[in-house]
Structures are given as structure tokens and as C-alpha cells.
Amino acid sequence: MINPQKPDSVIESIFSSLNESRSVEFKPSVPWPKDRNEFQGAHKAQEIAKSILAMSNSRDGGKVVLGVELDATTKSYVLKGMAPKDLISYDQDLIYQQVRNFGRPEPRFQVVNVERGAMNFIVFAVQPFILAPIICNNPWNLPKLEAAAIYIRSDKPETKKVSDPVEMKELVDAVVDRELEGFSGRVQKLFGASRPAPPQGKTDRARFDDEIKDLKP
């Protein structure tokens, strides 16, 4: 079992306002499969893996929080916590070894056991892609994952695969912006960090133009 820790300010704000979004998804308490064979029938765990891939393709990543349920009557989310028998099945190293098989390049994430009052929650803290979007890899032939699919989070919010030109353009724009951010950092290192900071409110593209203006003939 993962050692518990207190929620940080970001996770506490999620608990205080239980709303799903592009960067936040709630799941009920479920056990984590211990091996490939168990994974075949563990549809909830497969859905969590899919959400990790989708949030990896978001600009700022996101968090999948386990131990939160949707009340059928009020249609609102309620903190329930992880069932003790489910909680003990979560191991950071095991989960990473398994889930990294499902993305190319490998998704980057942490698994945290958050203790709040008398309840525990498992939080998958997902980091965004570095240079290229995460493409689904399905070497275990899991039914909830589709090989070569690119999963994203939508405004509904939901986890889905890219299916139209607008979604693809948004993802491509994120890739371009990420590359510009990296190139801007390399330019600063090359020419020194003594230049004044760019005015607030400028877009990444405008800042990029400022960085390279001295390179133009």
C-alpha cells in the first residue's frame, strides 16, 4: 500500500468543489489488478489508464481521483473514500510498470494516497506530454483501449479519442506551443538571460518573435 499523505492545496480545492472538468475526473473505489491476466477483466482500471493517456494530452495534465461517487438521486459527487480492501492493492511501482505499456511515448504520472479526515483517496497526478502527444499502445489487447488511438479530455467533460479536425487542430496547436516554449528556453540559454522580461499578457508566439528578432537579417 502507498503511504498516505495530507492533501496539498490543489487537491484540497478539488475536494472542496466536487466538479469534473478537462483536468479532473472522479472514479469510485476499485481494486487495482495485480497482473496482466487480472487486467483483462478490470474494466474500471482500463478506464483509469485511458484517462491517464487523455490527460497526458492536455496542456496542463490533470488528476484522476478515486474514492468519489456520483449520487444517483442528487446527481452530485460525494466523497466516499477508498474501501480498505481496494486501497491495499495500490502500489506505485506496479502501476507505473503496467500503465507505461499503454502509451507511446510513455505517460508521466504519480500515484498518491491522500488522507483526508477518516478517508483515503487514490490520486493519479498526470503530467502533460513533453514533445509529442501520447498514442495508445495496447499490447495486452485490453477491450477498453484502442491501439493507435489518441485520447483527449473534452469540455463535457469526458475521455474520448480524437475524432474530428477541430480536436486534432487543438492538439497540434498544443504541440506547436510546447515546442515554441522549449525553443524559447534554448534561445535564452544561448544568448543569455540578461534581456528584460517580456511584457505581461503577450502570447507564446509573440514572446517567441521577440526572442528571435535579433536573429533576423
Image (spheres, grey):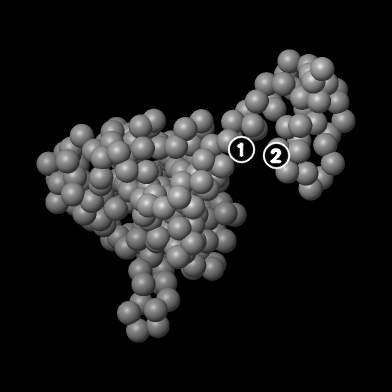
Amino acid type, label 2: Asp
Q: How many marks?
A: 2
Q: Residue 28: x and y, percent?
A: 32, 63
Residue at horizontal 42 percent and vertical 72 percent from the top: 77
Q: Nearer the viewer, residue 108 or 177?
A: 177
Disc 2 and disc 1 in contact, CB within 8 angstroms: yes
Tell me: 116 left or right of 99.
right
Q: Quadrant of the C terminus?
A: top right
Residue behind mark 1: 177
- Secondary-structure class at tag 2: helix
Q: Nearer the viewer, residue 22 or 6?
A: 22
Q: Residue 38: x and y, percent?
A: 14, 45
Does residue 162 appear anywhere in the picture? yes
Residue 204 bears which disc, if any?
2
Residue at horizontal 18 percent and vertical 49 percent from the top: 143
Residue 56's place in the image compared with 119, above or below, is above
Residue at horizontal 71 percent and vertical 38 percent from the top: 205
Q: Residue 213: x and y, percent?
A: 81, 25
Amino acid type, label 1: Asp
Q: Residue 137: x and y, percent?
A: 28, 36
